[in-house]
Amino acid sequence: MTGYLFLVSFVGLFSIIALRKMMIIDRKLTYPSGTATAHLINSFHTPKGAKVAARQVSALFKFGGGSFLWSFFQWFFNAADDCGFANFPTFGLKAYKQRFYFDFSMTYIGCGMITNYMVNISMLVGAVISWGIMWPLIEKQKGNWYGAFLSASSLHGIQGYRVFISIGMILGDGLYHVLYHAGYMAFVLIRSLRSNKPEEKKLSSEMELMEAGGVPSGYIIAPVLAFCNAYGCGLTDWSLASNYGKIAILIVSRALVGEEEGGVIAGLASCGVTMSIVSTASDLMQDFKTGFLTLSSPRSMFLSQVLGTAMGCVMSPLIFWFFYKAYPVGDPKGPYPAPFGQVYRGIALLGVEGIGSLPKHCFALALSFFALAIAINVATELLKRYETKYKIYRFVPNAMAMAIPFYLGSYFVIDMCVGSVILFVWKIMNKQQAEELGPAVASGLICGESMWGIPAAILSLANVPAPVYMKFLSSEDNAKVDSFLSSQT
């Protein structure tokens, strides 16, 4: 894996570096996240900024320590799967079976404090539609729409509906943004080139320089996509790396449709190559924008990026192995469900096997939600352009966010909504303090629980179990357990 990462991780960096001057200085692309980061860094170098930074660091360590201790406390009650505070049936056992519960995760609460309110609400809407309405109705068709004896994790059963309907929404949202940003970039480039002919010559010469930079011949398409993604990210702050990756899966796995295993592996490998190249290119250009505004050396930033990428190529496989050996990575009910792993594999299987392998009505439902995702985005854009009085577009759900709980459930969504409520109430009570310390508090909650993951993994590898098994049963099941235990004494 390390060799593979070294092979693909540097292409995006070297394919886009020649275009730094054109994008940042000549075109003056905004790169909103890079610009915001630069302003934040610059603000630290003022007397007021230094005091705010000191308070933020203090909040980060306080809440990080509290989150770590809370995670340590929870471990004592987590002697097996499906037990402990992480499986507390907050809204009752029936809701728990549909994955509606609060799992006391400080990470997700922190994420909710950082994430936009509407994104969290969109995920909650998606969870209610899927786990509250659709999946219970589809499960009633077991034996009719899909095999009665299929396991719950089979893609030919109920899991197929969860994965492929989610994929339909994700692809619909992704396709809309790819086409929208491609059209917008084309319009901006054509208008700019027509109004400034010398720029056209400069762009052409820099593209030739990029080609002469030693881009491997096997990676011809991905560097082109890297340029498109970096340019679009500079205009809109949206990185479409995952969408390009999904398109690569469908194209490559479909081309190898006769070879089931080969098609899946080839599709996923092409996705990894494409996403690595495309995302590193846009990230590098964001960093160049930050460096430009903070008067940092672009050469030093590039060398730092290369060094960090090389370290990641070595560390990432080790960290993956560490978690893979210590936890059930990929288990939907585990602490690390890795939902997009199942989604990407599902896309590859769809490309290889075709729609005939899906459960009954699954493709029709996926296609309907694909169209729904496009319709939501079109409606949002129209409202944004033509309804400016009440700004109703702010309250239209986000299609991508709605799709995520279709597979995972709503337990993490409820945590994130709790984070949003905390931040909302905090802003009502003291808006300035919330805006200054909110991100630091959220980061502390996330980092504290993440740090506990290391000793927890070590304990798991050493086969040290938690001392207490805390599980919640209905009164009927509890009576059966008590009766069984009494018969054993």
Image (cartoon, rainbow, N blue to C red):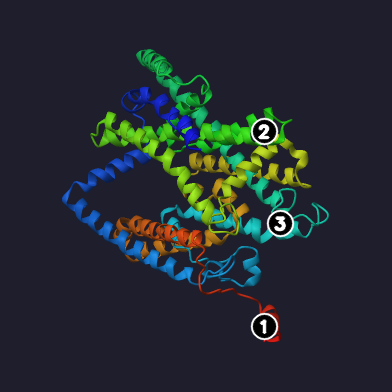
Residue nearest the observer in this picture, 487 or 341: 487
Q: Is residue 140 visible?
A: yes
Q: Which residue is mark 1?
A: 485
Residue nearest the observer in this picture, 159 or 37: 159
Q: Is residue 353 left or right of residue 21?
A: right
Q: Is residue 340 left or right of residue 385?
A: right
* Disc on the earlier residue, 3 or 2: 3
- Please tell me in which quadrant of the rendered image residue 179 appears: top right
| Front disc: 3 or 2 | 2
Circles 3 and 2: CB distance less than 8 Å?
no
* Disc on the earlier residue, 1 or 3: 3
Could you say where residue 140 lies in the image, as x and y percent from the top left? Answer: 78, 60
Q: Amino acid at mark 3?
A: Ala
- Please tell me in which quadrant of the rendered image residue 271 appears: top right
Q: Is residue 283 left or right of residue 300?
A: right
What element does badge 1 sit on? helix
What element does badge 3 sit on? loop
- Taking the view exactly as shown, the residue that stands out farthest to the right is 144
Q: What's the residue at 69%, 44% (across, down)? A: 366
Res. 263 mark: 2
Q: Is residue 235 visible?
A: no
Does 125 appear above or below 22?
below
Q: Amino acid at mark 1?
A: Leu
Mark 1 to mark 2: distance in Å?
Answer: 52 Å
Does 361 appear above or below 101?
above
Q: Which residue is mark 3?
A: 152
What element does badge 2 sit on? helix
Q: Amino acid at mark 2?
A: Gly
Does 320 appear above or below 79?
above
Q: Residues within 10 Å of mark 3 (few under 14, many from 20)?
A: few
